[in-house]
Image (cartoon, grey):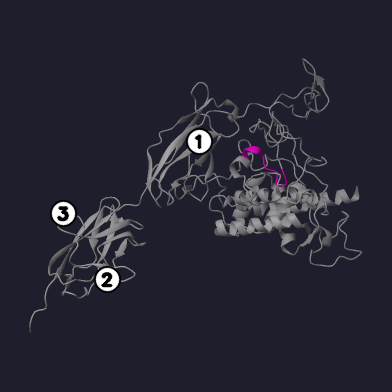
Amino acid sequence: MAAHFGRRLRKGMATAALAAATVAALSASQAPGLTDSDTGRQRTDSPAADTDTDPGATGNSPYYMDLPPLNSPTETPSDGDDDGSGNSGETEAGIPATVLDAYKKAEAALAESKPGCNLPWQLLAAIGKVESGQARGGRVDANGTTTGILGPPLNGNGFAKITDTDGGAYDGDTVHDRAVGPMQFIPSTWESWGSDGNGDGKKDPNNIYDAALAAGRYLCAGDRDLSVTSQLHAAILSYNHSQDYLNTVLKWLEYYRKGTHEVPDGTGVLPTDRSDDSDGPSPSPSPTTPGTTKPSTQKPGTTKPGGGTTSPAPTDPGTGSATPSPSPTPTDTVARLEDAGTGGLTAMAGDAFGERVSVRAESASGVGVPKVRVRFTIVGDTDATFTGGETIATVTTSATGTATAPTLQAGEKTGDFTVRAAVVGRTLSGLDYTATVTERQADTLVRTSDTALTCTPGGQFADAVEVKATYKGAAADGVAATATLIKSADDTTQNDNGPYFKDADGNPVRTLTGLETDANGLLKLPQLYADDTTGTFLLRINTTGGATLTVELNVEAATAS
């Protein structure tokens, strides 16, 4: 009892010390999902801090509140270094080998894909500690998969209310969602952020490699920079909307940054102090499959018609009367998703789309429903992304029920792809929008010099031909072009006489393909040579998009002096 009281006292002191600074920091920052005041757009998928409508990564599920020992993990513990919890600093600093490897691999992957995020692996370790005690002390198999770690049903009684979104596929519960795995993702968030961290072709929330990478991507959503204190705090709060949660994670982050070491899998220290005073996550029931019955998760209670039991209704401790069931959430009232004036979605490779997908969540009576999460997903063979580099973005509907996706950014792959909009937490028909990426184009092509291009028979032209391509007045970079020595203005077939380029072996070439303008829209052609034929010749340069330029080349005998 004394040790338990000591931990509670320390928690209270930590909360009081950090509360004012955290609130000030968050006031100066924007949690992802809110409107960017500079651009008017909505950032990509990270929940806004609205606990009624946005459950974060975990559905605000319970977590471990044990705090790290007071002694530094780099110190050698002595007989007097125990903190009252039975765990020394040296012991608590040990992270199971496979779990530690997963965190470090996730950090490396994010350093490559999102270097501006500055994700430290110690942050993943801190979150893994409070969510599952580092996968229950590193109880994972050779591939990094746990036996299943499952949170309580998210039925609205003390947690977010989330009606089943996965048919029990991840959590074995077809009534309500539950947080799953070592990083405690709810199924709907895993659907958005699930990752394959160990390269086995699967995205499994129970695998520490997959879950650690997904957690890193979630924390790095949008354009977050976790080296900025306010953005670090916003990222942690997006994971679980609790001030105590933030304080606890920050304490472990500070502790792990001072030093850690590897311990064998299955030997990590197990935390004991849960925010809901329970014994913590338990092994999950097997996910449901067709033709099987989901294991019951109900407590003994009243008998249901036709057999079975259901939990007794919770009672008000003051009156003893039954507590009414939670009111329907806004998501429960959505009957359909309608288009909200989305225009044509077309952009050139490398450009931002001028139109954004906009949808409206409506009730059965046609009224817009606010505070509903809408997930936008890019589907198809494309390298297009939303602003921030993600292929999935979740936006909360406005007061009119409208949700607008972040700006689409075209990649280099041309062709069609799909942007799919769906309501998170409801099985409703979504909306699909076709988006098209076209080749880079130029509408104007001009020489960068007005110097006449002349040469003597058998010689070479002194000046190379350089042109600039523009599109709607702006430099057109990466535009494909061809250059051909043509017979005449009326006959654009290749000329077999006159000026020519050379290939790698020095042979005459009169048509060049595979040319491309540089970042400034410039294209400089190779050296031109002349054969023994004199006269005026034409060089025709064509670009994707229809821009064409014809250049005169004169081959004249030298004038006698």
Position above or below: 454 against 62:
below
Q: What's the amino acid at mark 3?
A: Asp
Q: Which mark is residue 491?
A: 3
Q: Nearer the viewer, residue 264 or 77?
A: 264
Q: Which mark is residue 421?
A: 1
Per the image, label 3 sits on a secondary structure element best described as loop
Q: What's the amino acid at mark 1?
A: Ala
Q: Nearer the viewer, residue 530 or 240?
A: 530
Front tag of 1 and 2:
2
First reached walking from the N terminus: tag 1 or tag 2: 1
Q: x and y percent of residue 523 in the render?
A: 30, 63
Q: Which residue is mark 2?
A: 527
Q: x and y percent of residue 191 in the render?
A: 61, 40
The kind of secondary structure the magenta stretch mainly shows is: loop
Magenta span: 181-189
Splitting the image into 4 quarters, where does residue 159 fall? Answer: top right
Apparent side of residue 532 relative to residue 333 in the rendered image (left or right): left
Q: Is residue 23 visible?
A: no
Q: What's the amino acid at mark 2?
A: Gln
| Image quadrant containing the C terminus | bottom left
Apparent side of residue 438 relative to residue 228 in the rendered image (left or right): left
Q: x and y percent of residue 161 in the render?
A: 67, 32
Q: Are marks 1 and 2 in contact (CB under 8 Å)?
A: no
Q: Nearer the viewer, residue 546 or 371?
A: 546
